[in-house]
Amino acid sequence: MIAVALPLTPDGDQAREWAQDELAQEIYRVTEPTPFDRFARAVGEFVMDLFSGELPPAFGPWLASIVVLVVVAIIVVAVLIWGRPRSITRSRASAHLFGHEEGRSAAELRRDADAAASTGDWDEAIVLRFRALARDLEERTLLDPAPGTTVHGFAHAAAELFPDAGPALHRAADAFDDVRYLRRHGSAAIYRDLVELDTRLTRATAEAVSA
């Protein structure tokens, strides 16, 4: 009599064991995703959820932090791109005063004006003192004379800030033009009036101007 091998019907535990043994074979391990594959898939799913608006709630705070960082970065870049050229332009404008290259501060211009006056060079003293007056208002950010501004244009703008000093400002501008362009000589009296005007405006505060 020939024995025939009958097919076995495994129970649940034995079937699970057979399946684990089968999946443990090399052919199945080769097809498993690597850690990099899992990471790439997770990133791809996150990007898709980001555009579809289906992010899990756990990503809410994290995504908000990213958005804040991006906004801050944009602001910093904008300041670097648009803020710096403006400051450069301002520094270049400050180097010019009434058509002349002038890098001295108000204090330095006053010192040089007094030095010229001490030698009787009233023409130079008047020019330098008027420049000192203008540079002082510029340094205090009350006025910002643009390149090409004339002394009379400056006097008009300054008179709007200091109405009571308007007539004296225009007389000072006339004196500047007289000695600078019309070859009319200045005098000790003109310089003294200009010094008094400069001192008066220097003592005026921003509050007094706005009042």
Image (tube, rainbow, N blue to C red):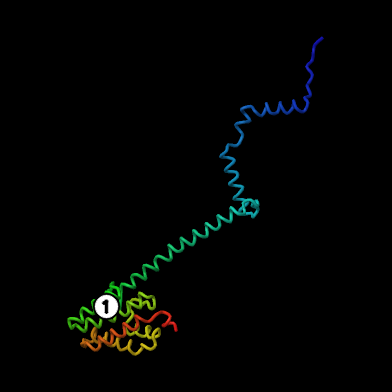
User: In the visual, does 7 lie left or right of 78?
Assistant: right
Which quadrant, please, contains the N terminus? top right
Q: Is residue 126 above or below residue 5?
A: below
Q: Residues within 10 Å of mark 1 (few under 14, many from 20)?
A: many
Residue 79 position in % (x across, y down) = 45, 64
Q: Is residue 119 above or below residue 50?
A: below
**At x 23% / y 79%, what residue is drawn?**
114
Residue 44 position in % (x across, y down) = 59, 47
View extreme (left): residue = 119
Secondary structure under badge 1? helix
**At x 40% / y 85%, what residue is drawn?**
160
Quadrant of the image occupied by residue 204: bottom left
Residue 119 position in % (x across, y down) = 17, 81
View extreme (top): residue = 1
> In front here: 181 or 176?
176
Inspect the image, locate mark 1, and give the three-letter code of the amino acid beneath it: Arg
User: In the visual, does 155 lie left or right of 30?
Assistant: left
Which quadrant, please, contains the C terminus? bottom left
Quadrant of the image occupied by residue 30: top right
> In front here: 120 or 75?
120
**At x 31% / y 85%, what residue is drawn?**
197
View extreme (bottom): residue = 167
Quadrant of the image occupied by residue 206: bottom left
Residue designated by label 1: 110
Label count reads 1
> In front here: 74 or 112?
112
View extreme (front): residue = 203
